[in-house]
Image (cartoon, grey):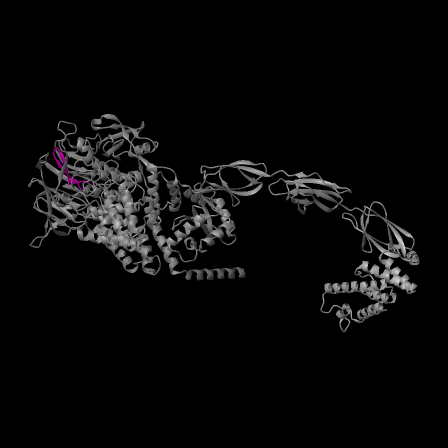
Amino acid sequence: MRHGVMTLAWACVLSTIVFTQSPDEEVARRQLDSGRAFARQGNYTEALKDFRAVADTHPNSSVADNALLEIARYYIDVAGDTVQAAAAVDAIVKKYATSDSAPDAYLLAGRLALARSHQSADLDSALANFERVFRLFPSSGAVPRSLTLVGETMWYARRYDDARANLSRTIAEFPTNATAAEAYLTLGKVLLALGEPALAMEEMQQVRNRWPNTPAAATALVRTSLLHRLYIRARGGPAWALSADTIGPVKLQNVVGLAWSGKDALFSAAETGVSVLTSGATERPQAVVKPRGLTVDLAGQVVAFDAGALRPPTGVALTLAVPQSGGTPKALSNLQAATQLSNGDWLVADSSDRVLQRFSSTGTHVGTFGAGRITRLASTETDTVAGLDKDAKSVVVFDGAGTLTARIPLKAIGYDLEEAEDVTFDAFGHLYVLSRTSIAVFSPYPAAPAGAAAPTATPAAPAAARAGAYRLLTVFAPPQNDPAGFRRATSFVVDPSGAVYLYDDRAERVMVYR
Amino acid sequence: MKRVGVAAIVLASLVAAPSVADAGRGAGGEVGRGLSRADQAQDATATAEQLFEQGKKQFGAFQYDQAVPLFDKLIALLTAGGPGAPVLKPELLVQAYELRARARFALGDSAGADQDFTDLLGLKPDFTLGAGVSPRLIKVLDSVRRLTIGRVSVQVAPPGPITIDGKVYQVTAEPLVIEIKAGEHRVNATRPNYTPFERNVTVVATEMATMAIVLERVAATITVVTMPDDVEVFIDDVSKGRTTKGAVEGVSAPLPITGVSLGDHRLRLTRACYVDFDMPFTLVSDDIQPEPVQLTPAVAKVAIDTADREATVVVDGESRGLVGSDVTVCAGTHVIEVRGARGRFVDRREWKAGDTATLKATLRSAVPFVAVHAGAGSTPEQLRATLERMLAPASRVMFFAPADAELAAAIQQENIPADWLSPMLGLPGARLPREAVRDMARRLSTRLGVQGLAAAAVGADSYTVSLLLLAAGSGEPDLLTLSLTDSASQGRVLERLNATLPSLVRPAIDAAFIDVAGTSGAVVARAGNGAGLAPGDIITSAIGKPVTSVADLQAALLSQPATAQAIALEVKGAGAVMRKVPAPVTMGVDTLGVRDPALLANRALLDLQDAVRSPVVGVQSMAASINLALVHMRLGNWDDALAALKDVQMLDGPGVSAGTVSYLNGLAFEALGRAPDAQAAFTKAAASPQARLWYEGPLVAPLARAKLQNRR
């Protein structure tokens, strides 16, 4: 027994010695692994604790930078907290400038800049950070993604030739990297912007050919389908045909707005409130009394608005008020339309105003935007804003600063939209205008050279796009006595594949056109 | 008187003058100081002959009293060795005794004469005096003979030589009677295969002793004759030598092997390339000579079946000439190689006599292990052999262990440092510049007549092996890792090594097809003139098979033979009108994904170098050249890339075309610092709107424009 006690005592001493002598590095590594394990399980609170412990308690370990990177990724991808994300990224860039996390840190810095806005200052910052990746770390595994993001950023900046070159470089130099699929998809948008829709479809098809059965392949399918509808199908006949699909109740009354969520569900707003019309949808509508309309925020969530506030599905409502010279802000009380810009700012149209008002994402008034008595609003990811100005009998188009860039008359050769009711954009930036009995689609991009069946050697001058000029692509105006005809459409949405869901107030139902 | 006086003076001078032997003796009487034994013997002989001549002269002049001293001296000289010692010039001694005896007899010295005759007969028992000698003297001789000489009758079986006191006598089948001095004598008889005989015999004067010697046979001789010669002969597994060339062509000279004990034995005859001959035999009493033994050739016949008619056959490192005729090898283990310009085939096996086989020699790119670093517990040779065995299933590359001498000589001749590949295997050492490695690889490969080189090193854990493959002309190796104990890892490595290059040529229709949601079929997005299609057409069937997507259409297209010129399509056109379209098909070049990390660039280089050398023309040839250029680019061999592109002539058009070649040229020129050439090439590429980097890869025009932009 005495021997056994002595043996046990020695074992305890030895284990203690081992424990107290564990190197800082080993502990740091284990804690980083622990945090990653929590993150995989979705337990981000505990994951964050571990990551912070590594970064704060073991700053000299070889994994401190990795921990900061995990923190940054969490905040940008999960929490959506760009401030915290930026702090973590900043710490990596300053304290661990030569670590293996540095390239990804610059990528995140660029993404944060893009998340701030798609205005020129933020685009420049994004570009600089992405370019640092391949300039400072040419052998890093982050290079392919950085090239793709450069291409994407240049697309936002409307530098289409440069975008094309960078995206082509990604595809050429990293053809098997997953980012090449993204590059193809972005290249599709760029080529369309350069006036080469057929080539755009051809390039996006590569995603399906080379990465079949992937989410990117599914995205490519809807995008090529959309372009096919407008540039091929529409040339030889109607771009849409009435679908036998039904959506929503057989009878639907007084719909004031439709919206397509980021999770591919159709929402409607009527006097009775907000509803989800797509069966099997996981999203739940928010409770809104007498909604005036619907819009979609940057996260793809459907935001309803009533007379005076924006009502997201979660969180607090944004009651909007415009400062007055007298001091007391004037609450908006007759909201007509709303749309969100790339930096989170809201643009709203109130029937009492002849300008659009701009509010921050938290509801703070920023200023006015544009001019016109706008009844419907839509915007693109490049902050092109379209508004239906019935008084002016036109659709007005503004850039992200509120400068008028185009004015599309509601009636001109080839179309009559005098009974225009709604406007929207698709993923490529085509502008759709709904009148009571027709839909017109306009493109901001130059037309392909006549008879061109092949790519052109020199890039088509994108002057028209830059100047904001829109050209009519197609008009869908089924005869009213045709089953496909609609008599009193009041709102519509276009899904990612270009299918149209419109509410016909006369028919009191949502009609689907594919 | 005068005559005598003169003779006396001469004699006196001779007597007075010190003899040569005396002179040789010196003050102390020592013999031979300063002279060799041969010289001494020569001197003694000369002196003896002188003395004999003088003595004989005196004897002839009846000057017996003068002669006797001379003969005394002579006899003393000739018997200086003492009793039993060899007599110098025995014939001369016999004459000296005779003449002294006769001189003594003439001087009345009977006793002296008797003694001399006794000594003489001791030397030569059958001595007789010549004619003209006094009968009284003859009587004296005879009486001495009667007192001193006896006879011995010797018979020996088997007949042959005997020796009596060392003197040889030939005894035939009949007894040999020998007169011999009375007394005891030693008789010896020796024969091969018989027990040696030795016995003393006592001879009594005037009597005859009889000796009948029967030698005991204890062994026999076997004489071997072989056909061919140069056969090693074994008796009871002990080598007894080799037969030599005989007088008759193809038949050896007899090889007698004596001393083979009586009884049972085993005879074995061996010679390389012959079947061993094995035969028991028994020696009873007589020598034997079996019939000449004809050995059967032990060879195997090997036919080589190979497509390369200019390949050579090498057996155990020695060339046997071009393939074409069968090869004969001796029974045993051999390494048979077929070496061609494009590869090598190696067969190692044991061949048995009479084997015939056809070796199907598919030449694979030969890659010898030129540097191997084994871990603890194994040697480089063992590791080489293990890896050769493990990688034998590699169907496109043949890893093998080269002959040590050949490798050492090649390394020395090309002045290759021992550790030139070590840093690439993770071993200590300074990494050489790529160009230096490339140059050494090329020279060493040429010297060894192979297509590439390999090296291997065992890691710290003794099971993981880093394997390096370096094609001739490459400075950047492929690196693979395998575990000696994990067959799955070995399988993965073999899979990579065996992966065939994807098709470099593929059929194409001059149109672009897309999938459209909700549409079954492949939709035409773009169509070239002459394709028979229009944008918006929907392909619903190809070569009779339904097409529901672009993937279906591509599969149908790829299933077309290389000679197909059109593909039968069913097309739904505008207004849903169906029509059949035989869409023209062209074979277009495709390029490897050289950025693909899974691509083994050196393996690809071997395949492509082979493809370029093969006799194909047209698009196949262009595809091989362009892809060879691409792989060279990946390996940093820009000049080789340019060389590969030099003769590629393509038209401008969709897919890989003239613009592609221009762009690749531009990249190579740029890497080589040839700015104006790069500028020109990129300008050309930028003007090719449809050229792509690979079959459906990125357009080269934007890439070229970006290059031109960067250059400004």
State yes or no: residue A434 in magenta: yes
Residue B688 appears in which quarter of the rendering? Answer: top left
Does residue B531 appear left or right of residue A11 in this picture?
Answer: left
Q: Position of residue B411 (x, y in %)?
A: 46, 53
Does residue A136 appear left or right of residue A380 in this picture?
Answer: right
Residue placed most toward the observer, B155 or B622: B155
Q: Position of residue B440 (x, y in %)?
A: 41, 52
Q: Position of residue B312 (x, y in %)?
A: 48, 41
Q: Is residue A32 above or below residue A298?
A: below
Q: Is residue A507 above or below residue B1?
A: above
State yes or no: residue B547 in magenta: no
Residue placed most toward the observer, B616 or B502: B616
Question: Can residue A265 be seen?
Answer: no
**Residue at position x 12%, y 32% in the image:** A437
Q: Quadrant of the N terminus of chain B?
A: bottom right
Q: Residue furthest front?
A: B2
Question: Can residue B93 be seen?
Answer: yes
Residue B616 appears in which quarter of the rendering? Answer: top left
Q: Position of residue B188 (x, y in %)?
A: 81, 53
Residue segment shown in magenta: A424-443
Residue placed most toward the observer, B75 or A412: B75
**Residue at position x 87%, y 65% in the image:** B64
Q: How many marks?
A: 0
Residue placed most toward the observer, A404 or B499: B499
Secondary structure predominantly adopted by residues drawn in magenta = strand
Does residue A380 appear left or right of residue B279 in this picture?
Answer: left
